[in-house]
Image (cartoon, rainbow, N blue to C red):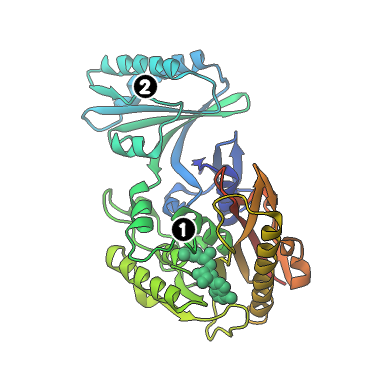
């Protein structure tokens, strides 16, 4: 069984995340914005994927990319397809990935489909496109993934077109709530987006234990999906305000955090308490303490390490080269000391994903930490991905100076 996923703003991160969870052979990139994974859609755990925007069921593949032919096919099959849906007004939307059709052309196709379906006696509303693809907010607000919704997704796959139907989109309201409504945030330590925290965790944990995942197809429509109990613990030794551990708890992991600043430990505690009052997680699954990650001996064992480590000073304008050099040395020292310290406390094979700083000194030109190339000497093996290059695992906005570079390593 296969599922199609539409990837986020930085598709390489989404591909690496899928490869990490489901394996390279089960993951296939389709064009530049989508992927197919050979995983039972019922256990795909879409809600934990920070790097995928839409989760779609593949309907068919056509041996053409010619839009006129695709439209002809749709006009022919849509009336029959619409009969399989429950009665009521149908919401219809179209999203194209990898095509060069104009919004005007897409609208014309939508109106032709609407006309064809209306001939069967059913009323239809076509959700107009502002761009070739509808975004998550449009899909949610127009109920396109609901029982009467029909968002058709077209993905160009070389000389073929995959046609799929959206089943779910990212819950943007929940992400925004988790990000903005928690009681303690701190612009100085950085605002790690929950989606990126999910990607960091997914890269840290590797393959998912399928047996522990509940099939969502057995949960009646409209009922909340329970948090799985994975019985594994994640450590974030630079936890700050606790975003990574918050997301880890929502995925079903035990959360263990430490930070050199007591204020941050208090922030994390309050944020996790807030989470447990608003989401189905228990804060008894978490533990936070003040500790310097460069020499602390953690009293507990943990299964994975997922962390956005010390990133140095935040910069809003390009700093002088000597300031970058100084910041780089400071980060290099703290992070290498931490890696040496923790290597003595984790079992061989333990997997870590760290977001470390890289500095965008010119558009798309980065200065990296030397430790990226010193993993072997530090006692770690770097994990590379088949579907995403090492140098693509960077999270940044076009004008952002401090980027987060994701490194995935295992203790030798
Ligand atoms: C980039 S922030 C992490 C932010 C975090 N991801 C969040 O959700 O807010 C880095 C954190 O590392 C902490 N830190 C810096 N040096 C440290 C050290 N030697 N040991 C432990 N924590 C340290 C800082 O206090 C800061 O909270």
| Mark identifier at residue 191 | 1
* Residue depicted at x 44% and y 63%: 243
SS type, badge 1: loop
Q: Position of residue 354 (x, y in %)?
A: 60, 63
Q: Taking the image as drawn, is residue 206 in sight?
A: no
Q: Place residue 225 in its image quadrant.
A: bottom left
Q: Is residue 280 above or below residue 259?
A: above
How many other residues sit within 10 Å of disc 1, few (<14), some (14-19) or many (≥20)?
some
The foreground one among 186 and 319 is 319
* Residue depicted at x 64% and y 75%: 338
**Which quadrant, please, contains the C terminus?**
bottom right
* Residue depicted at x 49% and y 59%: 197
Which of labels 2 and 1 is toward the front? 1
CA separation in Å, label 2 and label 1: 45 Å
SS type, badge 2: helix
The foreground one among 56 and 136 is 136
How many other residues sit within 10 Å of disc 2, few (<14), some (14-19) or many (≥20)?
some
Q: Is residue 147 left or right of residue 262?
A: left
Q: Position of residue 389 (x, y in %)?
A: 69, 48
Q: Position of residue 181 (x, y in %)?
A: 32, 59
Q: Is residue 196 above or below residue 8?
A: below
Q: Position of residue 375 (x, y in %)?
A: 74, 66
Q: Place residue 110 in its image quadrant.
A: top left
For the view shown, which residue lies furthest in the right direction? 377
Q: Which is more N-terminal, label 1 or label 2?
A: 2
The foreground one among 79 and 255 is 255
| Mark identifier at residue 78 | 2
Q: Quick check: is the Cβ at mark 1 less than 8 Å away from ligand 1?
A: yes
């Amino acid at each position: 069984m296969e599922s199609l996923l539409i990837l986020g703003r930085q598709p390489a991160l989404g591909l690496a995340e899928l490869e990490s969870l489901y394996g390279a052979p089960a993951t296939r990139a389709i064009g530049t914005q989508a992927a197919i994974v050979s995983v039972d859609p019922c256990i795909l755990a879409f809600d934990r994927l920070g790097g995928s925007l839409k989760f779609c069921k593949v309907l068919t593949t056509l041996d053409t990319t010619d839009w006129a032919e695709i439209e002809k096919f749709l006009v022919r099959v849509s009336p029959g397809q619409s009969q399989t849906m429950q009665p009521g007004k149908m919401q219809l939307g179209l999203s194209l990935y990898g095509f060069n059709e104009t919004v005007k052309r897409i609208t014309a196709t939508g109106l032709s489909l609407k006309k064809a379906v209306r001939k069967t006696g059913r009323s239809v509303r076509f959700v107009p496109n502002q761009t070739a693809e509808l975004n998550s907010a449009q899909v949610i607000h127009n109920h396109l993934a609901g029982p009467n919704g029909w968002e058709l997704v077209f993905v160009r796959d070389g000389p073929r077109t995959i046609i799929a139907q959206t089943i779910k989109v990212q819950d943007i309201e929940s992400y925004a709530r988790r990000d903005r409504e928690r009681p303690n945030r701190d612009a100085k330590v950085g605002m790690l987006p929950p989606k990126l925290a999910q990607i960091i965790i997914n890269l840290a944990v590797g393959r998912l234990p399928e047996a522990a995942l509940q099939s969502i197809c057995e949960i009646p429509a409209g009922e909340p999906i329970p948090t799985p109990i994975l019985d594994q613990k994640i450590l974030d030794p630079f936890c700050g305000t606790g975003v990574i551990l918050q997301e880890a708890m929502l995925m079903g992991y035990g959360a263990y955090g430490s930070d050199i600043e007591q204020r941050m430990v208090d922030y994390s505690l309050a944020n996790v308490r807030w989470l447990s009052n608003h989401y189905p997680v228990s804060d008894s699954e978490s533990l936070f303490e003040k500790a310097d990650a460069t020499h602390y001996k953690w009293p507990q064992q943990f299964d994975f390490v997922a962390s956005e480590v010390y990133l140095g000073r935040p910069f809003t304008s390009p700093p002088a080269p000597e300031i970058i050099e100084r910041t780089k040395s400071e980060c290099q020292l703290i992070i290498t000391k931490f890696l040496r310290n923790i290597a003595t406390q984790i079992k061989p094979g333990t997997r870590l994903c760290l977001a470390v700083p890289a500095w965008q000194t010119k558009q798309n030109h980065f200065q990296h930490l030397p430790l990226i190339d010193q993993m072997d000497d530090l006692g770690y093996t770097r994990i590379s991905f088949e579907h995403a290059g090492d140098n693509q695992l960077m999270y940044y906005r076009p004008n952002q100076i401090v980027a987060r570079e994701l490194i995935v390593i295992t203790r030798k």
